[in-house]
Image (cartoon, rainbow, N blue to C red):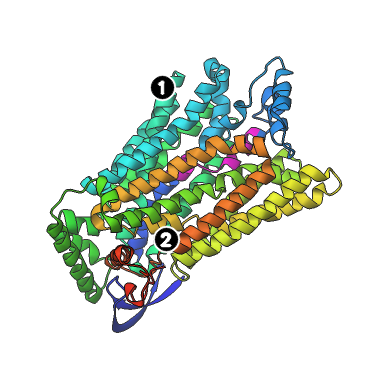
Amino acid sequence: MTIESFVGGSSGNFGENYRRMTYFSNNYVLGLTVVAGIGGLLFGYDTGGVSTSHTAINSPCLLSTRQSHLLEIHTNPAPASNSSLMAASSSSPDSTTLDDIPIALRKGVISGALLYIRDEFEEVNQSSFLQETIVSMALVGAMIGAAVGGWINDAYGRKKATLYADIVFALGSIVMAAAPHPYILIFGRLLVGLGVGVASVTAPVYIAESSPSEIRGGLVSTNVLMITGGQFLSYLVNLAFTEVPGTWRWMLGVSALPAVIQFFLMLCLPESPRWLYLKKDKTEAVAVLSKIYDPYRLELEIDQLTTALEEEHQRRSRVSYYDVLKIKELRLAFFAGAGLQAFQQFTGINTVMYYSPTIVQMAGFNSNQLALLLSLIVAFMNAVGTIVGIYLIDHVGRRKLALSSLCGVTASLIILAVAFLFTQSGGETNGNVYGWLAVLGLALYIAFFSPGMGPVPWTVNSEIYPEAYRGICGGMSATVNWISNLIVAQTFLSVAGAVGTGTTFLILAGVAVVAFTFVAIFVPETKGLSFEEVEGIWRERAAAVAAPWPWRSPGTGTATQPLI
């Protein structure tokens, strides 16, 4: 992975000396990235793909008679009416409702653990509300953690925010593993969610502020690779502990291990150099920067930080959340960043992952073991796609990568929609053909989403905000991601039940078209630009919006960044 560049500041205003920068050229920066990326591992482990959940329930060793009966109803590609679902559920003495289906199909390691929690706590087995709360409480905690985590980042630094997240996450894991009562377990889930929320904000910002601009995108995307690795790990943990006494306690308690490892490794690492220079200790900041840049480039970097510090002092006002709405350039940046985070969820990644076992069964493969293997393959494809994204994001650029990703996502969602619609209407004659068409759509979706819309929103949000607001705005945009995640999780099964799976995929394809338009209009290219240059883009856009029409005059952009 080689990136040609000139030695200069991280701004791209290069000097005369030429050199080749590579992803692996600085072991110190790579070490910072990997350690900070363990936060992404926590993120992915607890909030892993829903296909893992589905296959966990599909596994013969985990299913009760009632769960098998419900799953058979739900995984039928033909949409069932509400009346048929109710009739099917009421036909069993141990009846249940449709609400039981999505409860264990939400996220990551909790999906497999919940099946055993229901066996141990009768009140959980009898209450769909408790089951939903156990699963969803981590998501609620993540939304709170992301919102508060932005402020913690700006007030106390990226390093302390990471340490706080590790402590809370590890404590939550221990509470869950030792929980004597469902409500103690729910409290543990809340703590874990808080840790995940703070980590989801902190890791990308810490990596971005410690990275040379030429390879910043690839390094921040490494955090996304750790997220996909955490999802894969959650599946393996579910599988590994199925026959171990105290199954669910091991599944949930072992998640404390990466948090403890990151905590002790993080104690040995420095604070973000940019935060240090602007908020605390210039000498220490220069010492850290000297390990990242050569002497000539170090001087340019310090010059940029000095300019940023002078602007900070001139502002002389306290940073507040209200500023995001009041300051025009900040509002434009947040709109672009939060929009990317929302569309990452609304383009249907969790929906597609959820239906992956159903899709492979449509192709004529009905083995439960094959469904389990599919989860491994899908997780592997997701990870490989993220690695491709790490390479492309600093070559092709964030904006182009997102646009090309959304084109492929739209096409693959249309393929999935056609496959499901024709399977539902065409009977068994061509079912296998359309099943294979659905498998093709699934493969294309993962291939296009994982290198583009997977890492791009997190990368862009780590670099488009001014230093003083990077934590707050990053936290707010991450909160948008978690809220969007919750909306999709709570609605897609209902929508699929109401209009059919094929139509649901068509709706998602329409959302992807809207997302393409949004990125084309509102998201600038930030490849290779310094943080100061990115700030300049938003100042120019804010001035252009305020100018009389036509506001996109030749003089409103820079040589490297057009307005639209």
Q: Residues within 10 Å of mark 2 (few under 14, many from 20)?
A: some
Work out whether residue 562 or residue 139 is closer to the camera in this orientation and state it: 562
* Residue at the spot of label 2: 522
* Residue at the spot of label 1: 184
Residue 367's tag is none
Amino acid type assigned to the residue bearing label 1 in the image: Ile
Q: Is residue 389 left or right of residue 96?
A: left
The image position of residue 427, as x and y in percent, is 83, 43
For image coordinates 52% across by 25% down, the residue present is: 131
> Extreme right residue here?
429
Query: Element at badge 2?
Result: helix
- What is the C-alpha distance between the residues marked 1 and 2? 44 Å
Q: Is residue 32 magenta?
A: no
Q: Quadrant of the C terminus?
A: bottom left
Query: Element at badge 1?
Result: helix
Q: Is residue 419 left or right of residue 298?
A: right
Q: Provide the residue span drawn in magenta.
A: 42-57
Q: Quadrant of residue 536?
A: bottom left
Work out whether residue 82 or residue 22 is closer to the camera in this orientation and state it: 82
> Extreme bottom residue here?
16
The image position of residue 440, as x and y in percent, is 70, 56
Q: Nearer the viewer, mark 1 or mark 2?
A: 2
Q: Is residue 90 left or right of residue 145?
A: right
Mark 1 vs 2, N-terminal side: 1
Work out whether residue 8 or residue 514 is closer to the camera in this orientation and state it: 514
Q: Quadrant of residue 5?
A: bottom left
